[in-house]
Image: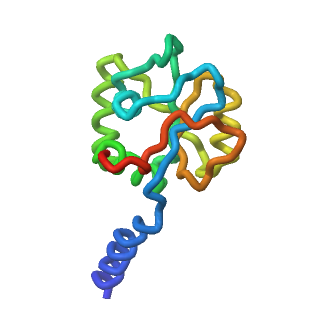
C-alpha cells in the first residue's frame, strides 16, 4: 500500500510539471540594464557572468523547494535542482561566484519588493506573473531553439 502511494505521488509530480508555464521572463526593476541575449542569460545563471553593461548584477532565486524554480533551471540549462546546487557549491568554494539570493516566498509581490530594494537585481518569473512593476530583459520560451 505504501509503495502505491509513493508511485502515485511520483506520477502526479511528473505530470504536474506540464501545468507549470514553459515560458519565463528575466526581469528587473532597473531601467539602466540592457536587454539580454540567450547566451548572457545562460552565463548569468551558470555563474559565469556577474556584470551587464558595466553594472554588477545580483540574481534572485525562488525558494529551493519551488517547482517553478526547478522547471526554470531545467528549461534554461537542462539541470535539476541537485545539479545546480552542486555547480554552485563548487563555484562558491572556489570564491568565484556569489549564489543568487533565495527569496522566501514564491509570488510576484516578493519578487517586485526584492527588485525595488536591489537596483541592479535580476529575477526570473513565469510570464503570467508579468506586471507593470518590472521591466523584461529576456523572454525564455518564445524562441524555438533553446
The percent coordinates of residue 98 (x first, y second) are 43, 23
35 or 70: nearer the eye? 35
20 or 23: nearer the eye? 23
The percent coordinates of residue 100 (x first, y second) are 48, 32
How many badges with numbers are in the image?
0
The percent coordinates of residue 6 (x first, y second) are 33, 77
84 or 137: nearer the eye? 137
* Residue at screen point 48% across, 43% down: 139
Of all residues, the one furthest to the top in this rendering is 54
Rendered image quadrant of residue 50: top left
Is 29 placed above or below 85 here? above
* Residue at screen point 38% across, 47% down: 143
* Residue at screen point 34% across, 23% down: 48
* Residue at screen point 50% across, 15% down: 53
Of all residues, the one furthest to the bottom in this rendering is 1
Rendered image coloring scheme: rainbow
Does residue 99 appear left or right of residue 132 in this picture?
left
> Which quarter of the rendering shows the C terminus?
top left
The percent coordinates of residue 58 (x first, y second) are 52, 25
> Which quarter of the rendering shows the N terminus?
bottom left
Rendered image quadrant of residue 18: bottom left
Rendered image quadrant of residue 94: top left
54 or 48: nearer the eye? 54
Is 19 placed above or below 53 here? below
Is 57 placed above or below 115 here? above
Amino acid at each position: 500500500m505504501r509503495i502505491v502511494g509513493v508511485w502515485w505521488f511520483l506520477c502526479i509530480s511528473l505530470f504536474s510539471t506540464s501545468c507549470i508555464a514553459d515560458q519565463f521572463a528575466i526581469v528587473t526593476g532597473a531601467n539602466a540594464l540592457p536587454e539580454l541575449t540567450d547566451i548572457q542569460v545562460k552565463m548569468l545563471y551558470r555563474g559565469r557572468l556577474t556584470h551587464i553593461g558595466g553594472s554588477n548584477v545580483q540574481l534572485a532565486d525562488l525558494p529551493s523547494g519551488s517547482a517553478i524554480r526547478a522547471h526554470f533551471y531545467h528549461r534554461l540549462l537542462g539541470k535539476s535542482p541537485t545539479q545546480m546546487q552542486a555547480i554552485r557549491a563548487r563555484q562558491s568554494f572556489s570564491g568565484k561566484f556569489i549564489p543568487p539570493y533565495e527569496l522566501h516566498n514564491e509570488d510576484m509581490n516578493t519578487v517586485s519588493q526584492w527588485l525595488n530594494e536591489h537596483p541592479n537585481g535580476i529575477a526570473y518569473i513565469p510570464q503570467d506573473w508579468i506586471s507593470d512593476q518590472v521591466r523584461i530583459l529576456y523572454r525564455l520560451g518564445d524562441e524555438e531553439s533553446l
